Image (cartoon, rainbow, N blue to C red):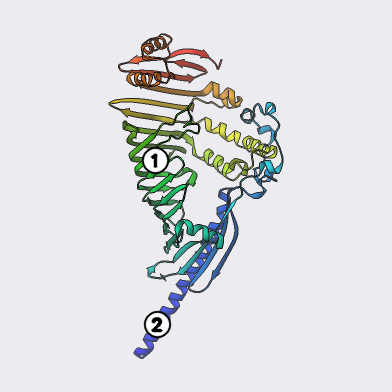
Amino acid sequence: MSKKAVLGVLAAAIAVAYGGSTWWAGTQIKSSYDVALGELPKQTALVRVIERSYERNFFGAVSTVTLELGCPAEAATAPAASAPAAAPAAATTDVAEAATEGDEEEPAEDDSDAAATPPKPVRITIRDTIRHGPIAGAALAAAVIDSELVLDAKAQAEAEKLFGKAKPLTARTQVGFGGGFTSDFTVAPAKLAEEGKGEFAWQGAQARLDMNAARTHLRYDMTMPGLDVSTASKGVQLKMGKFTAKADMDGSAGWMLATGKSEGRLDSFELNAPKGLGLGAGTEAAPAKAIKVLLQSIDLTGEATIKDGLYASEGAFKGKGKVNETAIDKFEIASSARRIQAAGYKKLADAWLQSTAGAGCGQRSKAQKDAMQALIEQLAPDLKAMAKHSPEAGLDRLLVEIGGHSAELSYSVALAGVTDEDLQLPGNALVLKRGVLKANARLPVKWIEKLAETGAESGRTPPPEMLAGLIEQGEANGYVKRTGDDLVSQVEFSEGQLKLLGKPMGNFGK
């Protein structure tokens, strides 16, 4: 065979192989769209696929999808059909009865559709321009997808007021041969100024998202450079500095139970209200008080895990700043949840998200309240089953440090020691018998003295000379106790008994 013939055969083989790869890539991308859009409405009642088209050719395709976001228009007229069916009568528990206790005494409500009509849903259309691989544009990939919003003439005119000629939202996605993908999102900067009203200036946002082929592992990085808002009427100014966030998450157990770590940082937050923020401020009876808030170096962290079928999560928010002339050396807010049965929680969350009753669509109508009642009755057995794992949640720490002194508050709520026998109890009785509430507070005496001095000028607090006597009276009555330079108090409810600073205050469960 001649050299030319060999090259010809080789070229033909390459062409066939490339064409087959391109056709395969196109088939896989089309299948992925079908699966994703088919699953989307099953996740929540608040998202629906209204219209879609997929025009495919050999080298690419164009997908156009219109989504409707919000309560469906029929929620007010046919709410019962959008909620899960009620559990059999034998499964109805007092948990549901307690949730609606007292309904008979409420004033009659208007059951008309007009009174229960939810806000009008919003529709958005997204167009994806798809280039099939194995060489898609300049990338070696199964496909490269460019996405953008499709706006009608009216929406385009409104968008140009904010974004100018730039596209409000764009995204480029590179799909790997294994099915995973990387998406880069860009939100254009926006600016709006109206004479006599104020100004809005947002510097846009960028984000990168990496997802594996199984759609169970997600990493993202996001950056928002800044935001400035001002109002003309009260001269309020709000400024946010650069915000960054990233996360590495595993959604194998469902994205409502995603595990992993996330973190974020906000460089600064400023609020300046020279005429105050109160609705009634600025009158002779309530003179306006200027408010200046500056928060800096704000860090946010979060972590979630699942171990032995139990979900746990914790998050923290901390930084420093200044309120008017008072410098805040440190502030921190930390909360957590522990021993949440993952399987039960997922079932509850899925049922809630898939129900328009749970989504809050048209709840003012009697029919929608009936749908909510049916949903609660259906979920009540699962709520009780979760109680056996001693679930707990609370505010682990709210701390503020000023001038070398700090105040702290914490609380937690839990169910502890629940048995199979306890699960036969009505909901309220179960909480009274096995519910646990703990709360702790610590406050510097110097802060109380300072507040008394400030409040005495307006007559809103007792004069400082009375303060020492009031503190002594609180100690004598067992409400607070003095520890060094601080006043502390502790409340605990467990086994049906309420304790204040360790001393019983009553026996509610027996």
Q: Amino acid at mark 1?
A: Glu
Residue 262 in view of the camera = no
Spatial separation of the CA atoms under disc 2 and disc 1 = 54 Å
- The disc, 2 or 1, on the residue closer to the chain's N-terminal end is 2
What kind of element bears circle 2? Answer: helix
Quarter of image, res 172: bottom left
Q: Give the vertical position of 38 relative to 400 (above or below).
A: below
* Of the two numbered discs 2 and 1 in the rendering, the one whose residue sits closer to the viewer: 1
Q: Residues within 10 Å of mark 1 (few under 14, many from 20)?
A: some
Q: Closer to the camera, 39 or 8?
A: 39
Q: Is residue 142 left or right of residue 95?
A: left
Q: Quadrant of the C terminus?
A: top right
Q: Is residue 453 above or below residue 39?
A: above
Residue 114: x and y, percent? 69, 43
Q: Which mark is residue 146?
A: none
Could you tell me which secondary element the residue under label 1 belongs to?
A: strand
Q: What residue lies at 63% left-to-right and 31% top-to-bottom? A: 96
Quadrant holding the N terminus: bottom left
Residue 11: give its label.
2
Query: Would you place residue 23 above or below residue 509 in this image?
Result: below
Q: Nearer the viewer, residue 58 or 485?
A: 485
Answer whether residue 91 is visible to the viewer in this image: yes
Residue sticking out furthest to the left: 404
Q: Residue 497: x and y, percent?
A: 50, 16
Task: Tell me how many marks there are.
Answer: 2
* Residue type at numbered disc 2: Ala
Question: Quarter of the image holding residue 105?
Answer: top right
Marking on residue 303: 1
User: Residue visible at 38% across and 9% down?
Assistant: 469
- Which residue is at the front of the view, 228 or 134? 228
Query: Measured from the top left, where is residue 305 in percent x and y?
Result: 41, 40
Which residue is at 58% across, 62% downward? Answer: 52
